[in-house]
Amino acid sequence: MSASRSKKVKVWVRTRPTTKFAHENIDLKADGKTINLHIKREERHGVVNNQILDWAFKMDGILHNSDQGEVFEKAARPLVSRCLSGYNGTMLCYGQTGAGKTFTMTGATENYKHRGLIPRSLQQLYKDIEEQTDYSINVRISYLEIYNEQMYDLLSPQPFLEKSGQMAIGEDENGVYVKGLTQHLAQTEEEALNLLFEGETNRVIAQHSLNAASSRSHCIFMLSVESRSRVMSSAVYTTSKLNFVDLAGSERLGKTLSEGKVKEEAMYINKSLSFLEQCVIALADRRRDHVPFRQSKLTHVLKDSIGGSCDTVLIANIWGEKEQLDETVSTLRFATRMMCVSSEPAVNEQVDPTLMVKKLEKDIVDLKRELAMHDTLNNRSMVTYDPLSEQQKFDIKQQVRKYISAELDEVDIINIRQIAGVYEAFREICQTMEADMEAKLREKFTLIDKTDPEQIREAQARGVNINDDGTLVGEPEGSGFGVGLAPSSAKAPDVAKDSTKGAKITKKKGKDRQSPAPTKTPPAGSGRAVDGRTPSPQTERKDGQPADKGDLETISPVTSVSPEKTAPTFQRPSTPPLRTQAFEDFKQEKGVK
Ligand SMILES: Nc1ncnc2c1ncn2[C@@H]1O[C@H](COP(=O)(O)OP(=O)(O)OP(=O)(O)O)[C@@H](O)[C@H]1O
């Protein structure tokens, strides 16, 4: 077989034995692959009316006068073997009514020797499973029938006709499936054969003038195989599907003298086979990116079973008599198209999540051991990779504190977890400092939300000189934080600043502005402090009168400040000192830094 043929769907032609084989019309070549047809014009009955009278077809092989065993060995055995390795496989029988499709697929029930591909495949499958003692392999069986575009479960515990309409074709990451179709676990070959025969008895059989037991439906016998290793604890396992498709016979309505119900059946069959052919043509054409699988139930169910990653084999059943020549040509043309469909089988590997977790846990333990060994060899035996204990976290925090206060030059870093611990400690310390800072501010000041009119009104009611927009009275727009009323003691001594440079010393308006006299005591009730606290001396006007709001130098402090803290360490001059003097004073007050 040429290299290119190895990546295409395999096609075998099987001839139905007959004493009336049309040797003068059908020439089977010695290579076992080529089949030539010579049809005289008068033999065509005007049905396929074109000028081509000679046909030459080359297939992957011709099974002429072959027994069931040979057909299985050549066409089906490779699929069965590969199925256990995780490859999907599909075996299709296509051909006219009476050409031997059901005989090929199921065989004659009355004679064991004539058993078909399905029982032989089951026999082979279970034999292989028995030999693969290292694997736990489960086989599940379904049997689907498509009759007049309706799906039936041939293995349903209920009468199969009741299942009609309750089934639907779905698709997921594992491919196409039929919702509502029962799956039956078959642990032995005998159990599997029983299921096959149970399904066979349920098949819709219509009396037909060409074939007394003609099957008027498409039947798909489905095997789902799941294989897990018993010896390796691998999370990966394989799943595969093996489909045996016995298509309904293609025939001409006029030829079969079909009437009524049988005629309707024939119309459905021909339609679905025609859709199947369209899909095959599209699959064979690499330029086509759309394949009309959804046109019929048959093509939709077979969407992932023809070519692609699926091992696909077609058996084209022909009936080599002179009267059947047109159907033979039609079947061989379909077979030739199928040969052009690419098929590159791929293993279906699945991952078991539970086993995967176990495997990863084991990997972690192994890696930790290896790491410990490396650390020992590198004299790093103190290093651990376990989560930090509470004591270790505490120690790290202490180190970070010392680092912040410059008692430590660096923090010990041994491993990644410790780095994370150091960052964590920094975050905690920062958050604590922030909270402390706010708490201290709240202790001293009344904090209000400048955007909350309610809070502003409340503060105003308590005598805070604050505008309706939240700015302090006299505060230039946009400056200030809307908080707080700084105690005068908290302010830097304004006198140190050079008033000639326009530095802000007071906000007091008026020409007789002077440096404040810090020793003056306000008269009782001369100003209102927030929260009713002691008003500041600065709320008093120079002339001894209570200050009005516009006269406020600054807002009153919230808390009284102890004299020790506020007592100036030097005498403030009443007029601005010289610049050099001021600098000396500043140094004296703030220190040489
Ligand atoms: N290779 C064969 N050897 C012996 N008998 C055969 C062979 N092929 C077909 N037959 C016989 O021919 C008859 C028709 O075969 P079969 O029912 O398999 O055809 P079919 O293609 O499935 O027809 P239909 O599409 O109508 O179901 C049966 O009696 C079957 O036993």
Image: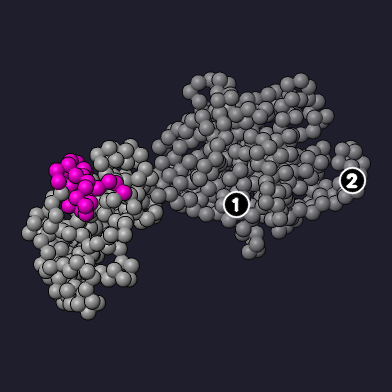
Q: Position of residue 341 (x, y in %)?
A: 67, 52
User: In the displayed structure, does residue 134 sit left or right of residue 589?
Assistant: right
In the depicted structure, whether residue 139 falls above or below residue 346: above
- Determine the residue positioned at 25% across, 41% down: 463
In the depicted structure, whether residue 48 falls above or below residue 409: above
**Helix, strand or loop for disc 2:** loop
Badge 1 crowding class, 10 Å Cα cut-off, few under 14, some 14 to 19, many 20 or more, is some
Badge 2 crowding class, 10 Å Cα cut-off, few under 14, some 14 to 19, many 20 or more, is few
Residue at the disc numbered 1: 308
Q: Pick whichever, 429 or 495, lies toward us.
A: 495
- Range of magenta residues: 523-550
Q: Is residue 541 magenta?
A: yes
Residue at the disc numbered 2: 50
Given contact means CB atoms under 8 Å apart, are the residues at marks 2 and 1 in contact? Answer: no
Q: Position of residue 128 (x, y in %)?
A: 43, 48
For label 1, being within 8 Å of ligand 1 is answered: no
**Helix, strand or loop for disc 1:** loop
Q: Is residue 97 magenta?
A: no
User: In the displayed structure, does residue 491 sit left or right of residue 562?
Assistant: right
View extreme (bottom): residue? 580
Q: Pick whichever, 176 or 499, lies toward us.
A: 499
Residue 76 visible at all: yes
- Determine the residue positioned at 76% across, 25% down: 263
